[in-house]
Each structure stands twice: as C-alpha cells, then as structure tokens.
C-alpha cells in the first residue's frame, strides 16, 4: 500500500521524472504515472494510484480492457478505445493517459520496486504493509 | 550531428512585429563551442545585436536558452537562462531562473526560444509542442504577476508553466524582472525588455521525450553525485534547514553584511533578523525547483504582530539583507512582505532593497525631501520602507525615478549621492561588503552584468572556509580565484544546473553527467569544459567592449574605494581594487585597458 505524507512534499517532481525514466528511459512528465499538484505556496502533493481493493477504474471500463493483477491495474491495449471512463472514475484523479494515443497508463508499481518512492528525497511516497 | 541527446536540437524564434514563428535546427558548433544556457545567449546576442541599439527598442532580442542537463534527473536541473541587452546597464545581461519553465520548454521540444520585435498590442505567447500562438493579452495587461499566473493556469491548465511581467515591467522600469512560477529572472531589467515588446507572458507545456545518450550510465553517476549532496554539510544540512539565509550570521560576524547602504558593518538588528529566527518562527514548509533534492526555498508566514498573515516564498538571503540590514530594518514581517511585493509587481528584490537604502540615505542628507517622497523615509522605518517599495513597484511619484536604479537616480539628485550609489555598471550591489572580503570587490568590478555576486563568489573561500589560506582582508590569490570561478560559473550557467547543486556535486560529476547526457566526449573533460567557460566569459566581455566598456567601468562605488569601514572586523579597510585588477587582466589575457588581446581571442576561437 502507498501512504502519502504530502506535508513534506516540496513539489520537486523527482517522482514524475523517475517514473518516465524507469518506464521509457527518457524524461517526459506527461508520460508519468504520478503527477504533482501544487497550491502555491502551502500545498504540494503527488497524485498516484492507491491500488484500491475495489478499483473503480477497472469497474468503469465498458470494454473490459482493465484488470487488477499483481497489486495494480493492468491494461489490455487491444481492447482499449481511449474512452477514458477510467480517468473519470478514479476517486484519486490518479489515472493518467499517454499524450500520444489517449490510452490510460496505469501505475504498475515498477514491479514492486516503486521507483518514485525510492527516489523521493523527502519520503513523501511511502510503501507500507507489503 | 545526426541526432542530439541532452539537447532537443531545435530553436524556436517568435517575431512579435510580423507575428510569425519559425523553428530551426540547433547548429552543432553552437553546442560544441558554447555548451548551452548562458553560452548560447552569449554567442547569439553577440552575432545578432548591433552596437548601440536601445535595449527597449524592437531591435533588442530575448534569448531563453536551456542546456544539456535542463529538465533531466540531474540535481536541480531547473535552469533556463534569459539573455538580452540590459536596460539597467546598457550592457550584457544574462539572468537565470529555476522553477519549472525551462524544463517545460525543453519538453515542448526547444533548446532555445528567441523573441524578436514588438507586438502592436499586449500579447502572450502560448507554446504546446508544435503549436505556437501569439494571443491577445488585453485582459492580462495591468494585472500583477500572481493574478497573471493564476489566470493563465485557469485558462490553459495548471500543467502550463509561465513566465510573466507585472506592472513594473509594463511600465518599463529598468529594475523589472520576469516572474516564473513564483521564482524570478530577477536582475538587470529583463521584465522591462518584455514590457517594451508588449509581451505580458509566455506559457508553455510539452509532452515530448527528453532523450539522454546513455541513461543507465547517467543514473549510475547520479547515484554517486546524490551521495555528495547528501553528505555535504551545506546541501545536505544547513541549506535545507535555513535556506539561502544559512550564511547570514557568518556574514554578519565577519563584518561583510552591509548595513544602512554600506555605511556600517555591524547590524544592531541581528538578533531579530537572522536565519535561526526565520527557521523557528517563520518558515512553514520547504519548497523545491524542478528535480531538486536540496529544497532551499521556504514558504514563510508571519504568525503574529502587525504583519500577521503576510507571507511569501522566501525570503532569500539577499532579500533578507536588502530589506533588513540595508534599510536598517529589524522587523522580519516587513522583510517578508517586501519580498512578496517585489514578486507581485515584478521587480528585482536586490536592486529594490539597495535602492530603498540609498533613498533613505539621500533623505537623511536632505538630498530628497519629505514633500518629494510624500512621507519621511528614515532608516529603520519598516512602514515607510514598504510604502516606498509600493511607489517603486508601480512607478508612482518619486518611485518612477528610483525604479530606474541608483546610478540614474544619483545623476538626477546630484550632490555627493554618486559616492554612495552602490552599484557597478549601473547594477545595484548585493549583500556583501567587499571591504571585509576583498575578492568579492574584484568579482563585482569584473562581473559581466554589473554588480553581481553570481559570476564569482570568493566569500566562500574568504569567509566560509575556516583554516583556509585566503585572508579575507588581503588581495593575494584573489585575481586567480575570481578568474577561475567566473569561468566555472559560466560553465554551470550553461549546463542547466543551479549553482548550489553544481558546486555541491563538484565539476568532476558535472562533466561526467554532461558526457553521459549528450554523448559528446569533450564534455567529459574538465579542462575542455573550463575552456568553454573561459570562451563564454570572453564572449560576454567582447559584447561589453563593443558597447564601449573598458577598465573605466570595471570599478566600484566611491564609498568602497575611499571610505574606511567604521566598525566590525574590517574596520579601517577600503578595497585596493587597482592592484587586483592589473593582475586579473594579465591572467585573463586582456590588456591593461581590459580589452581581450588578439591572441586570447584567437586561442578561444572567438571572432
């Protein structure tokens, strides 16, 4: 499970950068599975998948393109038509889409490695209870 | 080069007169010879601007340049450099900014954004990858920088990163800065250049990949470099806890923290204006620029007293000085509100505070009167300080003259005000008194953009290195130190990293990161990279020489050269500039008039 200590978030976006580096070997914050929101100057917060036990994203998909496996949502790109119902359904606003094709890019926990958590300089993203 | 790594390989030019945009390829030689950021600005401005153009005319251009490490995972790779001809000094200006604007511009696909000409009506530039629009901005004109930023994000999404001007830039104040995501391209009047182009703001968002040559190697080097930052008592400790104010007490103890317009060096308000006071009573939260693990920025709020509820992101060391000791003010709430006002109106806080202290001395000496100002302006009067700042920010009343800087104001006011107008080449001096640390005197005098501490910062060796061999009050070794550091800082300002992070990880890691990011072998050599730094520093010198600058302008205010400090550890001292300057020119390969010699120009492959 992910715990977010947003009061310690400085808004540096290292989580976004590391996420895209890990998945694509490039920097592209618009392809990251985590995004930082800022309400200047008092609030910064990383928004990312919380691995709901009853995932609304999976439930909402009209084509059954999303499943929940290995502790995270998994996309079957063959079935996805980029309708983005999953984006609207996520209660954490944590489902992001690939800017190229509009398909969701669900957090895959980096196979349990959680690179965002590993690189966060302020321990804002904490992996607990696994 | 077939494919660029670390660079996007593209230059975007927006011509506001004709209303067109054009994208060109980045010339390979430009990257190899000038690295990025400041280096790009130095070459482009030298090649493109004619001698003697008016900085506020459509002939001036603005170059926003990223660098190989901008927008990467390298620590604090947030930096983008804006170069232009300064309306404050009439000379070279580069001003760099952290935050998020540069990385977004790079993600949109551009190493460099050049702005030319002048729009007929107020406009802003909207950039999203290939889509570049010049948008009417009548509804934004007149708004302060906070409102402008908010409106743009409301309209285009909070993922757009902005750079904008406030009322001071619109009214062409030569000390107007450009505010970007609550940080600033502060110094030298870039805001006025934007205002002269009728350009209110730039908003940018990108979704293109930033590619590195060897991502695995890059990450490996990064892991080592991160360790350097973590174990450093500065970047891993003091700077995170106290922000840039970490040095304040040291500077005061050393007699280098200027008081009441550099008249004294012992500040009676130090018990209330210091880094510990800030950390304990005012800092609420750490904030950071893009990709920065240090988080030297602080969100501060005043929790009690007459300034209760006032807040800012900051204050930075320079501004704590500018509105603290420089104005003889020991009310921290007023310091915090002053920095907020500078950001709101879009003015450079160092210049604004320096100017306010100068005006206070003019008032004390009867050179300007209560009738002219509208109220008494005494040293130590926090409320008057803020009222005066409002006048500067809005260019109202006597604020109109003072927002032009102390050099112009002194010419207008006359008397002996030129003696205590604390500037070099027209740019107001920052928070170090060179009579107590002689090296910074030479650094001020030879800084390419005028009175600035970020072209070389010898106080690190003079004051902050206990047991070191640099006597702060002597002149030995200072010219060599200043020359080398100017070249090094030119490299850092052309790399994409912030100075704090870059000096924290050292040049050794910086060059390895540059090589892994770009695949360019030369960038992996400290000697070759330092030569690029020297080339850049000579290029900006040649720009200034073309504008008529020479030894005559490489000087300090009369007060520092002839008025001995009355108190503190440097009591009785003045700056012996000429001796240091002679040696500095020799080391640089410049003649005794300060002109780069022909063989120096040839050695550095400059034309």
Image (tube, helix red, strand yellow):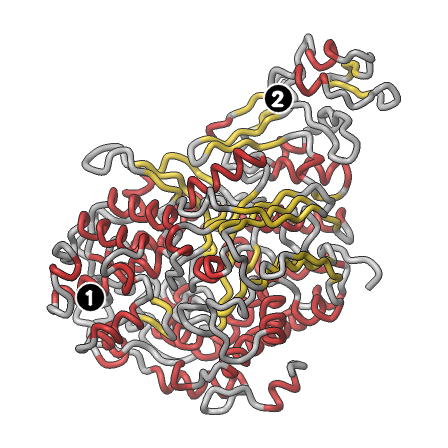
Q: Which tag is nearer the camera, tag 1 or tag 2?
A: 2
Residue A25 lies, in percent from the top left, at: 76, 42
Tell me the number on the disc at residue A93.
2
Q: CA distance from mark 1 to mark 2?
A: 56 Å
Residue B429 lies, in percent from the top left, at: 34, 67
Residue B146 location, quadrant: top left
Q: Is residue B338 above or below residue B414?
A: above
| For the residues bearing labels 1 and 2, Cβ distance under 8 angstroms | no
Q: Is residue B219 above or below residue B65?
A: above
Residue B434 lies, in percent from the top left, at: 32, 71
Q: Residues within 10 Å of mark 2 (few under 14, many from 20)?
A: some
Q: Give the residue drawn at x 31%, y 43%.
A: B278
Tell me the number on the disc at residue B58.
none
Does residue B57 show up? yes
Q: Which residue is under mark 1?
A: B264
Q: Secondary structure at mark 2?
A: loop
Label 1 resides on the chain identified as: B
Image quadrant holding the C terminus of chain B, namely bottom right
- The number of numbered badges drawn on the structure is 2
Q: Give the residue drawn at x 51%, y 60%.
A: B197
Label 2 resides on the chain identified as: A
């Amino acid at each position: 499970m992910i715990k977010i200590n947003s009061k310690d978030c400085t808004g540096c976006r290292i989580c976004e950068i590391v996420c895209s580096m890990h998945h694509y070997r490039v920097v592209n914050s618009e392809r990251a599975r985590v995004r930082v929101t800022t309400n200047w100057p008092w609030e910064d917060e990383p928004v990312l998948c919380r691995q709901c036990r009853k995932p609304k994203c999976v439930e909402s998909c009209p084509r059954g393109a999303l499943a929940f496996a290995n502790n995270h949502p998994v996309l079957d790109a063959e079935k996805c038509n980029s309708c983005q119902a999953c984006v609207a359904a996520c209660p954490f606003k944590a489902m992001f889409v690939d800017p190229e094709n509009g398909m969701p890019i669900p957090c895959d926990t980096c196979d349990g490695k959680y690179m965002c958590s590993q690189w966060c300089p302020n321990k804002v993203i904490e992996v607990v209870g696994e | 080069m077939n494919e660029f790594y670390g660079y996007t390989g593209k230059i975007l030019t927006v011509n506001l007169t004709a209303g067109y945009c054009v994208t060109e390829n980045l010339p390979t030689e430009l990257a190899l010879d000038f690295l990025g950021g400041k280096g790009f600005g130095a070459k482009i401005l030298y090649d493109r601007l004619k001698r003697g153009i008016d900085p506020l005319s459509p002939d001036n251009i603005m170059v926003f340049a990223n660098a190989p490490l901008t927008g990467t995972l390298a620590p604090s790779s947030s930096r983008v450099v804006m170069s232009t001809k300064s309306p404050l000094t009439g000379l070279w200006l580069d001003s760099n900014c952290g935050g998020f604007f540069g990385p977004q511009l790079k993600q949109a696909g551009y190493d460099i954004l050049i702005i030319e000409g002048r729009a007929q009506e107020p406009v802003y530039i909207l950039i999203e990858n290939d889509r570049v629009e010049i948008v009417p901005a009548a509804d934004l004109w007149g708004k302060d920088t906070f409102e402008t930023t908010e409106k743009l994000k409301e309209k285009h999404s909070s993922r757009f990163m902005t750079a904008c001007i406030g009322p001071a830039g619109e009214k062409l104040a030569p000390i107007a800065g450009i505010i970007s995501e609550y940080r600033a391209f502060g110094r030298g009047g870039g805001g006025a250049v934007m205002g002269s182009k009728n350009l209110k703001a730039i908003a940018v968002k990108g979704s293109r990949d930033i590619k590195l040559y060897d991502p695995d190697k890059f990450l490996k080097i990064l892991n080592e470099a991160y360790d350097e930052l973590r174990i450093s008592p500065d970047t891993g400790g003091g700077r995170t806890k106290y922000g840039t104010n970490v040095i304040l007490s040291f500077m005061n103890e050393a007699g280098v923290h200027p008081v009441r317009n550099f008249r004294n060096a012992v500040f009676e308000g130090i018990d209330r204006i210091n880094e510990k006071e800030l950390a304990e009573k005012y800092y609420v939260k750490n904030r950071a620029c893009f990709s920065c693990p240090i988080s030297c920025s602080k969100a501060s709020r005043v929790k009690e007293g007459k300034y209760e509820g006032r807040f800012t992101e900051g204050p930075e060391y320079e501004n704590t000085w500018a509105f603290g000791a420089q104005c003889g003010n020991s009310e921290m709430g007023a310091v915090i509100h002053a920095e907020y006002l500078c950001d709101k109106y879009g003015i450079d806080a160092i210049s604004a505070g320096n100017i306010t202290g100068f005006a206070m001395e003019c008032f004390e000496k009867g050179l300007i009167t209560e009738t002219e100002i509208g109220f008494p302006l005494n040293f130590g009067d926090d409320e008057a300080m803020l009222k005066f700042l409002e006048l500067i920010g809005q260019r109202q009343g006597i604020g109109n003259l003072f927002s032009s800087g102390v050099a112009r104001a002194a010419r207008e006011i006359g008397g002996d005000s030129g003696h205590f107008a604390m500037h070099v080449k027209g740019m107001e001096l920052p928070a170090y008194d060179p009579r107590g640390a002689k090296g910074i005197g030479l650094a001020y005098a030879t800084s390419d953009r005028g009175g600035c501490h970020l072209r070389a910062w010898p106080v690190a060796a003079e004051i902050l290195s206990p047991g070191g061999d640099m006597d702060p009050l002597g002149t030995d070794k200072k010219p060599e130190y200043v020359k080398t550091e100017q070249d090094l800082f030119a490299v850092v300002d052309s790399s994409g990293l912030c100075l704090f992070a870059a000096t924290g990880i050292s040049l050794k890691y910086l060059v390895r990161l540059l090589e892994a990011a770009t695949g360019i072998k030369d960038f992996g050599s400290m000697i070759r990279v330092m030569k690029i730094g020297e080339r850049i520093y000579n290029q900006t010198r040649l720009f200034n020489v073309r504008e008529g600058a020479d030894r005559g302008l490489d000087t300090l205010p009369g007060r520092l050269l002839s008025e001995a400090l009355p108190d503190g550890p440097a009591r009785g001292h003045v700056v012996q500039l000429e001796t240091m300057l002679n040696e500095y020119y020799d080391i640089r390969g410049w003649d005794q008039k300060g002109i780069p010699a022909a063989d120096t120009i040839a050695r550095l492959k400059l034309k």
